[in-house]
Amino acid sequence: MAIKVLLTGATGMVGEGVLHECLNHPDVSSVLVLGRRPCGVTHPKIREIVHGDLFDLTSIQDELTGYQACFFCLGVSSMGKTEEEFRRLTHTLTLHVGEVLSRRNPGMAFCYISGAGTDSSEKGKVMWARVKGKTENDLRELPFKAVYAFRPGMLKPTKGLKNALKLYAYFGWVYPILRWLAPSTACTLSELGLAMIHAVTRESPKATVEVSDIVDLAKP
């Protein structure tokens, strides 16, 4: 049965790439894009809610019902932020959205974009890794059908999309080398999107999805 997906972060590189895979996949019947500004993509499968404050979903929560999956691709860099700031924009925001969705969609699978090197113990020295680890752990306490934490490393952007980070324009040549020498550190954005879809439709055996698992899940 085709799934209905709720997706956040569509104006970023990862969210745009995952959205692209959803729109082209036969097992996704529709996508609700939730964001603070329009994603700029039109397609028969898309419905969009532009909502300025994702910390307060009260006025739109009735519209967030009836979805089998959430692809949570919203995220910020920790660079230049205090731990308190990063925690608010990462852990607090994600958990708020998760709490609303889990109440409205008890059969939902929540797919969270985390990152390679995330610290599940929440005790390490790397600030962003601790915060991401706590976010993963706390999401698993919510009453979802399943929670999958995706931990991509280096991502090769999908050709033709507009939100690829400029960094990849300068260092894209590194990708094939990493894929050859250290395949567990790099995958394509297309593979990430497909893996998220397949995690829901096929029920991934792993709740923490590392790079090698992403590549395996993306396969037809």
Image (cartoon, rainbow, N blue to C red):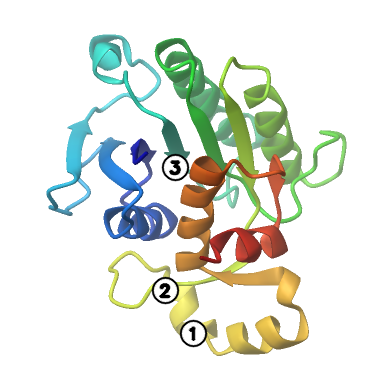
Which residue position holds label 3?
74
Q: Does the residue at mark 1 contact the one at mark 2 (Cβ under 8 Å)?
A: yes
> Horizontally, is 126 left or right of 36 in the view?
right
Percent of width and height locating residue 169: 44, 82
> Type of residue at label 3?
Leu
Q: Secondary structure at mark 3?
A: loop
Q: Nearer the viewer, mark 3 or mark 1?
A: 3
Q: Nearer the viewer, residue 89 or 153?
A: 153
Q: Which mark is residue 170?
A: 1
Residue at 55% from the left image edge and 90% from the top image edge: 173
Disc nearer the start of the sequence (3/1) = 3
> Type of residue at label 2?
Lys
Residue at 12% from the left image edge and 48% from the top image edge: 44
Q: Secondary structure at mark 1?
A: helix
Residue at 71% from the left image edge and 87% from the top image edge: 180
Q: Does the residue at mark 3 contact the one at mark 2 (Cβ under 8 Å)?
A: no
As measured in the structure, the alpha-carbon distance from the residue carrying label 3 to the one carrying label 1 is 24 Å
As measured in the structure, the alpha-carbon distance from the residue carrying label 3 to the one carrying label 2 is 18 Å
> Type of residue at label 1?
Tyr
Q: Is residue 60 above or below residue 121?
A: above
Percent of width and height locating residue 114: 62, 46
Q: Quadrant of residue 211?
A: bottom right
